[in-house]
Image: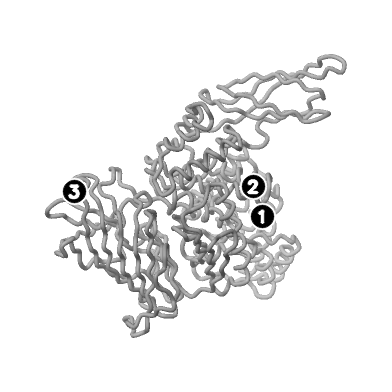
């Protein structure tokens, strides 16, 4: 399931957006092995949206994985436990530890290993803001009039082994009669089954019950007023629940969801349930979330141009997360990395090789931005850190991309489908995946997985060569070597030789720091490129520049503007003409209300290398805002007009330009909303 909230899309690259979105996928593991396993929940929850109030009773069946004297569960600090009962309905004491969001319940008689029991929790509280969130600064559970969302990550019920402990559940949710509730599993009651019992305000209520009978990660509930769109194409039972403000784009999102679900179904095999609920979340939480049969998209992510990459990532989690889940923290990339690369494969399917190349560039930058710890040692990192997510999400995805190159298309697809089938409904480890890959490859892949799982760094290829003429009409011989500085490195690498005639491709086994090659061509060689199709994770000055910008943007999100500025200046050290680096620096100065410095940097962005293209239109827009703020309306209008003349509507730029041509931009009172 999908720590930091995403700002306006106009200031984010897709790589950072997904990185930040996925951060809540990480549970707050303790260093020790799990002491208990939750098997089933029976939860009755009553929501009073007007008061932001939740009142619940949760019956938790669990099994001891070792002899237990104390049962420990995570629970949102905004909720207060009023009663705990044992299996015989006898009261037990409970200790709240706010530092780690846990409830500790002593078991007077103890619980022997491999035996099971049941505890019943009664609890209540208000869920209105992020003050008590298990992820600092991010609302993961909220009860309100317009919409209520109780994400599994919000720990709104007693949780053990978040993201690792698979469980079944029956969840009954009582809400005001005008609200619709979306959850995982079979709904035994619905909007036509109103309860006669009024809520605390005396308003009529109704109850929705969701039974999920296959162990996974149910527990995400969304309630509100939605317009529903349905589709049964491709054998799906698809329901799209959007707010009325997005009704115009709902049909296109419905069509895209069907196409993506069908594509992954073909790649990985069918899921036990053909049902999928695509539901809109408010803009004050994560950009997207997933749960069994649920793909949630935050309102700002639902744009007129279908955000099919974000949607694909959310839907792919139905296979990688819901069906196959990680056995440990070190295996977390089997969920997030697999979903990320599934998204990239759908991009390739929809937009061709150029689309895949852009996705690979994003993932390469994310892979190397925080490349300090091997992926196999990810458990040593803070699970809420960008370093952890850089590894499990982007580097995990790049490992799959490279494995696809090593195995070949047919063997790769066979490996992925077999893994999805063999471990459907179960947890899996890296060793489980490696065994299937090696079986299909026909040889051990120790050299591959050791390089990318147990090491850090990536090669920066350099090629030098000499061309010899073989004689009249006999062609040419090219002799040279590929150099890079990782002594233990081994990978097959594509060598492309452009000649006067046809282009020649040859696969070279690069081993160690220097790998010689000899290639004969008929036409005179004009240019030699190493790994031209980006099959291998490699470093370069461009990757280093974009990695600095990515780190700066993460620091900017966290409010550390000085550190962000330092990272952006590192990027400028690599390319003084980088439009993106100048743009990010301008943003920092704008946030600091240093408008002259900000304007200077926006001008430098416009006059830079123009990469990416959207920096031009948004720099003009931001300059217009600066002139409005400083009382220079005519100059502001000129900038907004120049923005419209670019005809670049990236992130809705043209709509904003037209808006401020009609009415001057006004600086928000809250600086954080600029």
Sequence-wise, the earlier of marks 1 and 2 is 2
Q: Residues within 10 Å of mark 2 (few under 14, many from 20)?
A: some
Query: For mark 3, what is the residue?
Result: 68
Q: What residue is at 34 percent from the left and 64 percent from the top?
A: 170
The percent position of residue 316, horizontal first and vertical second, equals 52, 52
Q: Residues within 10 Å of mark 3 (few under 14, many from 20)?
A: some
Is residue 655 at least partly visible in the picture? yes
Q: Secondary structure at mark 3?
A: strand
Q: Nearer the viewer, residue 198 or 381?
A: 198
Q: Is residue 560 above or below residue 514?
A: below
Q: Secondary structure at mark 2?
A: helix
Q: Nearer the viewer, residue 225 or 267?
A: 267
Query: For mark 2, what is the residue?
Result: 348
* Real-space CA distance between mark 1 and mark 3, rounded to the nearest whole angstrom: 58 Å
Q: Residues within 10 Å of mark 1 (few under 14, many from 20)?
A: many
Q: Which mark is residue 506?
A: none
Q: Which residue is situated farthest in the top direction here?
A: 471
Image-based side of 70 in relation to 20, left or right: left
Sequence-wise, the earlier of marks 1 and 3 is 3
Image-based side of 217 in relation to 513, left or right: left
Is residue 555 at least partly visible in the picture? no
Viewport quadrant of the N terminus: bottom left
Q: Is residue 48 above or below residue 273?
A: below
* Real-space CA distance between mark 1 and mark 2, rounded to the nearest whole angstrom: 25 Å
Q: What residue is at 46 percent from the left and 47 percent from the top?
A: 335
Image-based side of 589 in relation to 392, left or right: right
Query: For mark 1, what is the residue?
Result: 615
Q: Are marks 1 and 3 in contact (CB under 8 Å)?
A: no
Q: Which residue is situated farthest in the right direction here?
A: 472
């Amino acid at each position: 399931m999908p720590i930091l909230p995403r700002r306006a899309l106009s200031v984010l690259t897709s790589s950072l957006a997904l990185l930040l979105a996925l951060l809540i996928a990480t549970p707050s593991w303790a260093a020790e092995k799990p002491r208990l396993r939750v098997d089933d929940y029976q939860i009755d929850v009553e929501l009073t949206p007007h008061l932001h109030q939740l009142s619940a009773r949760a019956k938790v069946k669990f099994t001891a994985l070792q002899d237990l004297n104390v049962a420990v569960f995570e629970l949102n600090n905004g909720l207060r436990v009023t009663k705990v009962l044992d299996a015989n309905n006898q009261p037990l004491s409970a200790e709240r530890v706010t530092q780690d969001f846990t409830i500790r319940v002593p078991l007077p008689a103890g619980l022997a290993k491999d035996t099971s029991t049941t505890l019943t929790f009664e609890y209540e509280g208000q869920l209105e803001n992020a003050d008590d969130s298990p992820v600092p600064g991010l609302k993961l559970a909220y009860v309100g009039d317009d919409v209520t969302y109780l994400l599994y990550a919000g720990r709104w019920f007693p949780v053990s082994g978040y993201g690792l402990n698979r469980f079944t559940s029956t969840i009954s949710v009582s809400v005001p009669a005008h609200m619709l509730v979306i959850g995982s599993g079979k709904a035994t009651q619905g909007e036509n089954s109103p309860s006669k019992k009024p809520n605390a305000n005396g308003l009529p209520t109704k109850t929705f019950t969701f039974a999920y009978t296959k162990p996974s990660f149910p527990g995400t509930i969304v309630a509100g007023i939605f317009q529903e769109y349905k589709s049964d194409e491709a054998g799906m039972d698809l329901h799209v629940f959007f707010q009325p403000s997005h009704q115009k784009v709902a049909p296109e999102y419905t069509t895209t969801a069907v196409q993506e679900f069908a594509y992954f179904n073909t790649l990985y095999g069918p899921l036990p349930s053909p049902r999928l609920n695509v539901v809109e979340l408010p803009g004050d939480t994560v950009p997207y979330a997933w749960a069994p049969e649920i793909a949630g998209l935050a309102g700002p992510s639902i744009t007129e141009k279908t955000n099919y990459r974000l949607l694909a990532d959310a839907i792919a989690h139905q296979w990688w997360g819901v069906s196959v889940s990680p056995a440990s923290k070190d295996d977390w990339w089997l969920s997030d990395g697999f979903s990320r690369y599934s998204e990239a494969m759908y991009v390739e399917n929809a937009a061709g090789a150029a689309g895949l190349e852009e996705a690979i560039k994003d993932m390469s930058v994310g892979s190397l931005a925080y490349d300090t710890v091997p992926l196999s040692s990810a458990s040593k990192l803070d699970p809420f850190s960008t370093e952890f997510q850089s590894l499990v999400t982007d580097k995990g995805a790049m490992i799959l991309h490279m494995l696809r190159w090593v195995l070949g298309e047919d063997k790769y697809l066979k490996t992925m489908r077999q893994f999805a089938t063999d471990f459907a409904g179960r947890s899996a480890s890296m060793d489980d995946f490696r065994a299937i890959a090696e079986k299909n490859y026909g040889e051990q892949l120790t050299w591959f997985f050791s390089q990318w799982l147990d090491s850090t760094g990536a090669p920066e290829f350099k090629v030098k060569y000499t061309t010899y003429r073989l004689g009249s009409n006999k062609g040419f011989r090219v002799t040279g070597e590929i150099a890079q500085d990782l002594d233990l490195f081994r990978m097959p690498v594509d060598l492309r030789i452009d000649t006067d005639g046809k282009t020649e491709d040859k696969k070279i086994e690069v081993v160690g720091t220097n790998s010689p090659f000899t290639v004969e061509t008929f036409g005179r060689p004009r240019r030699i490129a190493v790994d031209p199709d980006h099959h291998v994770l490699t470093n370069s000055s461009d990757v280093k520049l974009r990695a600095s910008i990515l780190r700066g943007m993460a620091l900017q999100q966290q409010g550390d503007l000085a550190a962000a500025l330092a990272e952006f200046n590192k990027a400028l050290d690599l390319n003084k003409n980088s439009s993106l680096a100048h743009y990010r620096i301008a943003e920092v100065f704008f946030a600091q209300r240093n408008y002259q410095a900000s304007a200077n940097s926006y001008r430098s962005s416009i006059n830079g290398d123009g990469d990416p293209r959207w920096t031009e239109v948004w720099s003009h827009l931001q300059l217009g805002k600066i002139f409005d703020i400083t009382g220079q309306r005519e100059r502001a209008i000129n900038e907004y007009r120049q923005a419209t003349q670019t005809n670049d509507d990236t992130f809705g730029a043209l709509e904003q330009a037209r808006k401020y041509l009609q009415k001057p931009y006004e600086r928000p009172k809250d600086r954080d909303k600029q």
